[in-house]
Amino acid sequence: MPLLPSLNQKSIAVNKAFLPAHKLAALVRQGKIGCLELLNFYLQRVEKYNPSLNAIVVFDIERAKKRARAADRALSKGETWGPLHGVPMTIKESFDVEGLPTTWGRPDLKTNIPARSAQCVERYAEAGAVLFGKTNVPTLLADWQSFNPLYGTTNNPWDVTRVPGGSSGGAAAALAAGLTGLETGSDIGASIRNPAHYCGVYGHKPTFGICSSRGQVLPPYLRESDIAVIGPMARSARDLEIALKTIAGPDESDATAWQLRLPRAPEKTMRQWKVGVLLDAPSAQVDRSVQDQIQRLADFLTKRGAKVSEARPDIDLTDAHHTFIQLLRAATTRSQSDEQFARNVEAAKKVSPQAMDYPSWAATGNTLYHRGWLLLNEKRHRMRQKWAEFFADYDLLLCPAAATPAFPHNQTGERWERMVTVNGKPQPSTTQMFWAGYSGMCYLPSTVAPIGSSDGLPVGVQIVAPQYGDLTSIAFAQLLEREYHAFVAPPGYED
């Protein structure tokens, strides 16, 4: 008996592969497909398509099948575990899963087998999800590509000669190719946002601190870094809302004293939204292919009655760029060895105070005295105030997630030595990190939603919301999904 009688069996399979998680869960609840059957369906697709993508790099198949059978038995008794009952999912390799390696792409961590799963993995299990594997990352999660000496290179399903993004590149590639039902990444420098943009899926970078990072921290550390967050990735904006509500909330060590109550999203028609639009920045130029898609969206919103303006927070963009890079590098400095830190100290001594390049900013950020960090932190909080003033008048800010669509693989040299082509000119790949830090360093949430394509590659928009306005940016993404542009599967993955 076909799952959906109006469709032939081939179209059923294609539809099922790319359905969002909430619709997969609905099929399970309605008895139109079993949990084990659904898991096996995705595993068959993984067997067929993953070899060319290398998106999923760690598998937990037998345990997943055991859990899927248990989920089927529960349903037969009328029991539903939660909103994701029976949905097969994967998760970024850097998240702890009991009994599986967590390496962050580092060979010296290949025997790191955690005894307990990350907080969010436990919460997904409580919601009924069936975890069957982990997806690829760059070494130390420190690149907008996803390759490492342990698991190799992940390719973009839209064009396997191009990157899927990083550091949640494996997650985005698996979602786009229809190899998994749901994913979760982490983000300190757009590691959720740029893979979503490059692969044409949805991603949400939450407000700092609302989702517990326990079990997603570089060993042997226990606490997340400044700016760093975890958040959901999916094939629909509705899935982002369900997943965020599943994983958000305090860690068990904090839960005795506080709880999370995110403000509800405003119930607005298109004409009731008031949004600012920022297409470009002087220190981080954006390719016309991306600008044009965001401008096309802005024109659509205007025609539909929304109030669209070039307004943005009263913040010097170049100063914001400089501040973010130093705060970012300070936040990640604990991953340096003593030898690396000593080299960076020597490099920082040679940096001119007038330097305007990424290597100089990174060198100073890597070796900041605490007083220097406090001064940067004060500057950051003044920027937060400017954002709050902006959001007193506007609901959202729309801006790029990255300077270009997905770029060709390039693993030679340091990240700042690898160039991307922006408006016909070479630009260091690290320059576009501005679009991560502009809002991210100020702890703001933002959702990336696909809005079109350029030369056959997806383009997304970054939707920035006020602090704790996570459900607002996700609601706007849902509005765009219904009325403007939704997820589109890459060609070649239909069978």
Image: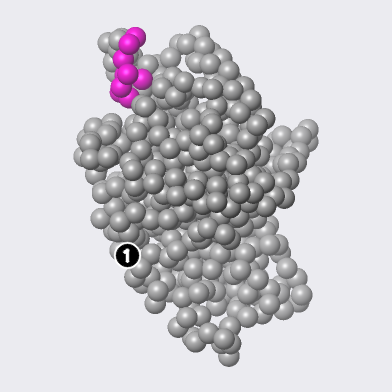
Identify which amino acid the numbered label 1 is placed on. Pro
Closer to the camera in the image, 122 or 52: 52
Residue 334 seen in the figure: no
* Left or right, residue 58 beside residue 238: left
Query: How far across and how far down the image is residue 196, in percent?
Result: 45, 50
Closer to the camera in the image, 35 or 403: 403
Q: Which residues are magenta?
A: 353-361
* Left or right, residue 156 beside residue 89: left
Asked if residue 149 is among those painted magenta in the image, a careful observer would answer no
Residue 379 seen in the figure: yes
| Residue at the (69%, 39%) spot, across then down | 250
Closer to the camera in the image, 401 or 441: 401
Query: How far across and how far down the image is residue 21, in percent?
Result: 58, 64
| Residue at the (25%, 55%) spot, across then down | 161
Q: In which quadrant will I find the C terminus?
A: bottom left
Q: In which quadrant will I find the N terminus?
A: bottom right
Q: Which residue is mark 1?
A: 51
